[in-house]
Image (tube, grey):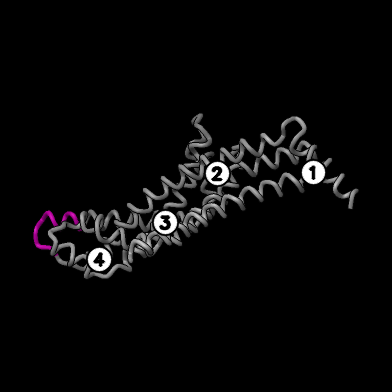
Amino acid sequence: MSDFIQDFQTKFYQDFIKDDRYQFLLDGFTETIKITFFAIILGLVLGVITAIIRSTYDRTHTKKYGSLSQRLIQYLLSLLNFIAKLYLTVIRGTPTLIQLLIIYFVIFGSVNINKTFVAVLAFGINSGAYIAEIVRSGIMSVDNGQFEAGRSLGFGYIRTMQYIIMPQAVKNILPAIGNEFIVLLKETSVSGYIAIQDLTKGADIIRSQTYDAYLPLLGAALIYLICVMILSAGVTRLERRLRKNER
């Protein structure tokens, strides 16, 4: 037992303390959080916009409009819905890693661009497609009578969505949205493929220097686990608060 402890201490010193190698994990963690945070914001914006376009089309495309302006709006909505469906099909049908590599090596291949920005763009666009379907399902789960209630209060479509529909939809989709954020955090581990020193890459750098994979990778896994647990606890706490507000 004493030999095991001594061996563990030696490896721990070699992997993390010597030459300040722990800094690789610390810097990688900071980069991972930065990418995840901004990708979540981009994903939410893209997802909500796409979901509103899709749900609005689903609710109104069968209606017949008489005025020219209304028909033009309907045609524009049909075009936007087609673009949204194409976006969802392509993004959800291809691996995240392939999308990251295409954006970096193909789209921005001839441009000297910040790699973190590329990662945020790739993961944000990818996450937006999944968030869009989650939000759309939440909007469609709200009864049509709520739209009628909004009109009876003198609200237009936009204000009805803002003040009546979206607050109810958010309560329905909060667990799924929280799960998507957790998935996004873990997906950023492939950032190293475009030479970003994220948390996973930081652990791999330590492994390449010490030729010991056990502790660096275990350390990175533990950090990911703690982050996921914090996110899960935050979502659970928010759900409880929303339930209290309903009462």
Q: CB atoms at circles 3 and 4 under 8 Å apart?
A: no
Residue 104: in magenta span: no
Q: Position of residue 147 (x, y in %)?
A: 21, 65
- Say what secondary structure mark 3 lies in: helix
- Say what secondary structure mark 2 lies in: helix
Q: CB atoms at circles 4 and 1 under 8 Å apart?
A: no
* Labels 2, 3: front one: 3
Above-or-below relation of 92 to 100: below
| Quarter where residue 132 is shown | bottom left
Amino acid carrying label 3: it is Ile
Mark 2 or mark 3, which has the lower sequence index?
A: 2
Locate residue 108 relative to residue 45 in the image: left or right: right
Question: Across the whole image, how many numbered discs are drawn on residues?
Answer: 4
* Labels 2, 4: front one: 4
Mark 2 or mark 4, which has the lower sequence index?
A: 4
Nearer to us in this view, 160 or 243: 243
Q: Distance between the residues labelled 2 and 4?
A: 37 Å
Amino acid carrying label 2: it is Leu
Mark 3 or mark 1, which has the lower sequence index?
A: 3
Q: Which mark is residue 212?
A: 1
| Quarter where residue 81 is shown | bottom left
Q: Which mark is residue 59?
A: 4
> At 52% from the left edge and 35% from the top edge, which residue is drawn?
109
> At 60% from the left edge and 51% from the top edge, which residue is drawn?
226
* Labels 2, 1: front one: 1
Label 3 sits on residue: 131
Helix, strand or loop for the magenta stretch, by majority: helix
Mark 2 or mark 1, which has the lower sequence index?
A: 2
Label 2 sits on residue: 101
Amino acid carrying label 4: it is Arg
Q: Position of residue 214 (x, y in %)?
A: 77, 48
